[in-house]
Image (spheres, rainbow, N blue to C red):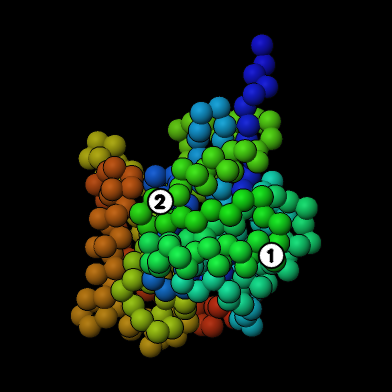
Amino acid sequence: MKDNSFKSGFAAIIGAPNVGKSTLLNRVLGEKLAIVSPKPQTTRNRILGVYHGDNFQICFMDTPGIHSTRTVLHKSMVTSALEAVREVDLLVFVIDITYPFDEGAEIILKEIKKRELPVLLVINKIDRTLPEKILPVIEKYAGLFQFVSIIPVSALTGEGIESLIEEIKKNLQQGPEYFPKDMISDQPDTFLAAEIIREKIFINTKREIPYSSAVIITSMSENPEKRLLSIHASIHVETESQKGIIIGKGGAMIKKIGEAARHELERLFGIHMFLELQAKVDKNWTKDTKALKKLGY
């Protein structure tokens, strides 16, 4: 007999850059799926993460930060995020309690008012402020839009996460089990590997380098006998000077990025890793629509 009590749905995590969307997704899943760095605009693609509950399933989409922009790359990122709003069953709108009323929030409020979707407001980073500063933010946002729920959380410490999952569950409809229980993402291993490498570029380089870098996995192969996974990847930048920075003096920087990425990838895939990185110049790729498509954007 068919079980009609199972609930499921797709939820987009939206917000301005650097409000903690990726950290929130990783905390909910209990796995590192989305890359994280202190720099804004780290996430460039929509990432699907699947939460398996007791008789329910939430399919989360982590999206790029929504902000006003003129560059081709960032326009592509914002378009991707706004498209997610049109494809899901509910929205999880994340704001940063330390900077709750920014330009990105204004853009998102205008967008969600056009949709007939349940929207949950998540006030993140409550570990960074005093409790008495949270209520005025709740009251302000409650007057701007009719949210189905407003939930203060700390994606960093986990406070409020169980309440968030319960609130999302309440707003799910009866539906199928979209993904098997052992699957937490629809992204291939090559995507996850490229994202981990890109995260290490964000963490270890400065100024324009993180935003001018893209990572392509050129090959990935496993040797079961040696329990070894070999990955070859290319780091694409826009200028020769950026290539020099990525490589570093005597190859020091690319070695540092590679070692950090390899250690994390070994934890992620549970296997010994050989990782080779190569730096390449793709002139002005962030401003070239064809280059963006070639590099996966």
Residue, disc 2 = 159
Q: Secondary structure at mark 2?
A: loop
Instruction: Spot the residue most to the front.
Output: 132
Left or right? Give the position of 59 relative to 206. right
Amino acid bearing label 2: Glu
Instruction: Spot the residue most to the top.
Output: 1
- Residue at the image position 65 percent from the left and 61 percent from the top: 142
In this orientation, which residue lies closer to the viewer: 98 or 23? 98
Mark 2 vs 1: CB contact within 8 A = no
- Residue at the image position 30 percent from the left and 78 percent from the top: 247
Whether 262 is drawn above or below 175: the answer is below
Amino acid bearing label 1: Gly
Left or right? Give the position of 2 relative to 280. right
Whether 223 is drawn above or below 127: the answer is above
Q: Could you tell me residue 10's position as x and y percent? A: 63, 45
Q: Could you tell me residue 112's position as x and y percent? A: 72, 61
Q: The C terminus appears in which quarter of the rendering? A: bottom right
In this orientation, which residue lies closer to the viewer: 215 or 37? 37
Residue, disc 1 = 143
Q: CA distance from mark 2 to mark 1?
A: 25 Å
Mark 1 surroundings within 10 Å by alpha-carbon count, few (fewer than 14), some (14 through 19), many (20 or more): few
